Amino acid sequence: LNTLLSGSYFEIQVGHDPSLATEFTALDEPPPLTTSQRGLVIKLKSQARKRLNNGDFVSFRGFTVGRVISSKLNLAQNAIDYEIFIADPYTQLLNQATKFWISSGIDMSLTTEGLKVAADSIDSILRGGVEFSAINQDVQDLPFDAEQEHVLFDNYDSARLNALRSGLLYVVMLKGNLKNIAVGSSVYYQSVKIGEVIEAPWYKDLRSLFNG
């Protein structure tokens, strides 16, 4: 945000060598870890077409708690591998229910219920980055696996629908026009919402369903 309003500028990191230096080499991107603060490095994999930059913010409910420290194109899996750093004490926010997604600041989607627009602050819209939260309350008490590679979802809705897979899943076959049923559509029982549609594929017949 500061760069967009005031132009380019240099950012520095204080060194610890006692000797004096008068010449420095400027880096094209921030170093992997810009501080000596304790924290946790987490690996993420994204299928999104948008690439995040080194130094982009990692946020929790609008608060900056870390940075993106590396990004690499994974040609074998047609994906982007990221490493993010979350500083202490914010690592306490992580648990097995944690999901990560790309925060673009503004999210627009067209559903059967109309156009949905969700916007964050101007700062979030301009800077973007990674956001995370504990979505599935059933496993919030279980510890976070820092050794595992986690999925970086395209947006919050994708992360939320993925968390629903831990519940009871049902396959419902319908005939006729399905234009009012899509991913994210609500499931009701006696006017009470009990779930959501997490996939809405089309199958020619039952044989193609079970062979797929």
Image (spheres, grey):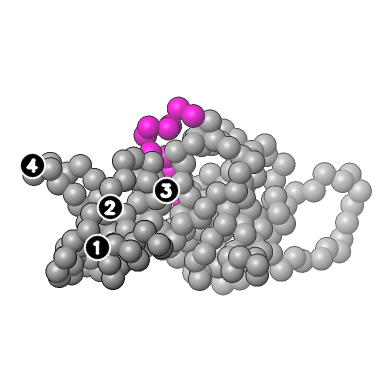
Magenta span of residues: 131-142
> Residue farthest to the left?
190
Rendered view: 176 above or below 148: below
Q: Is residue 139 magenta?
A: yes
Mark sitting on residue 171: 2
Toward the viewer: 54 or 121? 54
> Residue farthest to the top?
141
Residue at (58, 37) in percent of width and height:
145
- Along the polypeptide, which appears first: circle 1 or circle 3? 3
| Residue 11 seen in render | no
- Along the polypeptide, which appears first: circle 2 or circle 1? 2
- Along the polypeptide, which appears first: circle 2 or circle 3? 3
Considering the numbered disc 1 on the image, is that residue within a helix, a strand or a loop? loop
Considering the numbered disc 3 on the image, is that residue within a helix, a strand or a loop? loop
Badges 1 and 3: C-beta atoms under 8 Å apart? no
Q: What is the distance, in whole Å, between disc 4 and disc 2 at their CAs?
A: 20 Å
Q: Nearer the viewer, mark 2 or mark 1?
A: 2
Rendered view: 24 above or below 33: below
Q: What is the distance, in whole Å, between disc 4 and disc 3 at their CAs?
A: 37 Å
Residue 139 occupies quadrant: top left
Toward the viewer: 45 or 9? 45
Q: Which residue is mark 3?
A: 62
- Along the polypeptide, which appears first: circle 4 or circle 3? 3
**Residue 69 in picture, x, y percent from top left:** 65, 55
